[in-house]
Amino acid sequence: MRQLLSYRDARLLLVGQTLSAFGDWALLIVLAVWMKTLTGSSAAAGMTFFVFGAGALAAPLGGLLADRVRRRPLMIAADAVLGAFVLVLLFVHDRGDAWLIYVVALAYGLAGTVFYPARSALLRLMLPEELLAEANGALQSTTQGLRIVAPLAGAGLYAAFGGGVVAVLDSATFAASLLFLSLMRVPETRPAPPEHHFLVEVSAGVHHIWRTLPLRQLVIGVATSLLAVGFSETLIFTVIVRLGQKPSFFGVLSTLQGVGTIAGGLTAAAVMRRLGDIRTVGVGMAIFSGCALLLTRVSLPVVIVAFASVGVGVAWLLVAFGTALQLRTPLAIQGRVSAAADLSLSGAQTISIATGAALSTLVDYRILLVAMAVVTFASATYLLTRRREPVPSVERAAA
């Protein structure tokens, strides 16, 4: 971590992204609470997250844009646009204005399909390859750390002053991110102009993943596990009821998972150096599988251990997966590869969440937890038994 922080641009990026993440977590939970307050409908509140996720469908176009312009100016523009757009929430006063909350949620999702692929490519430009895992781990730790406190702060501000104040706070954090990005000095050349038909260009990420054996293995393994992992979104509330706790206890468990994720983010780079990217993802899945089995036990201490442990596993998985995409992809198509991978995984998870919600009314929750553990462990075994492929020396210039 000390070596990473010796880079001025890395320090600026981490500070800016930390501030921005605080505003994001504070506002996103408030959007759902605000919708519930205005409409009285839990379904309407839940639709806020659905609309936010729907923005991810534009990922192929966002990834292509991230590969066609310089990344830092694109990130600055995204911060400026979204930072101004969230102030639309100042016009929300009653039920008739509630649709503006959905518009802002959708804008958040759309902006992410541009910003995060661009950030991934910018990290490749500004850091040596051996520090990418450290940087991804640091970003993961700070993001998840703020997930513990920012929603509480957002909810408190909403209760005291209303949603407009939270929107202004979020807009200010976008301005802070923009400021720190503008202070960075990472050199960037203009990407090469497109050489192929639009459909060929936009699908280049999918083609690269399929042609690159380690990336194909990672996407297959993680997507397969996510076809079952989404069951947990519904089953966790059944587990909480079995423990004799109120649904609000989910906040405590989320905090424990966040603490585990911070620890996992800080240690992911060391694990990757020892195991490699593919096997680190496999170990993260194996931890999740074991934790799913632990949740079949009606024991509060066991569930607490499971949630703290799953945070470590998820962090190792995410950091290793993201770093593998960066290291095994030419810079010229970083955005499209990142977008293609995200779309594949989010699609599998969406299917899993819907399936789990339907099955939870028909099948005992312990059977579903075991099924989730079996599928995840099978995916982990698949990745852990793959041959360790060396990371190629992927050029930083356009390929």
Image (cartoon, helix red, strand yellow):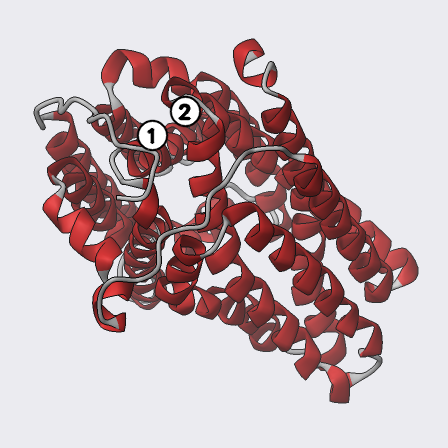
Relative height, residue 124 to residue 6 (above, below): below
The residue positioned 28% from the left and 50% from the top of the image is 226
The residue positioned 47% from the left and 64% from the top of the image is 53
Query: In terms of depth relative to the viewer, which is nearer, 228 or 168?
Result: 168
Q: What residue is disc 1 on?
A: 320
The quarter of the rendered structure image containing the N terminus is top right
Q: Amino acid at mark 2?
A: Ala
Q: Position of residue 213 (x, y in %)?
A: 11, 39
Query: In terms of depth relative to the viewer, which is nearer, 318 or 160?
Result: 318
Q: What residue is disc 2 on?
A: 133
Can residue 307 be spotted in the picture? no
The quarter of the rendered structure image containing the C terminus is top left
Relative height, residue 196 to residue 135 (above, below): below
Q: CA distance from mark 2 to mark 1?
A: 7 Å
On screen, residue 324 versus residue 130, left or right, reads: left
- Identity of the residue furthest to the bottom in this view: 96
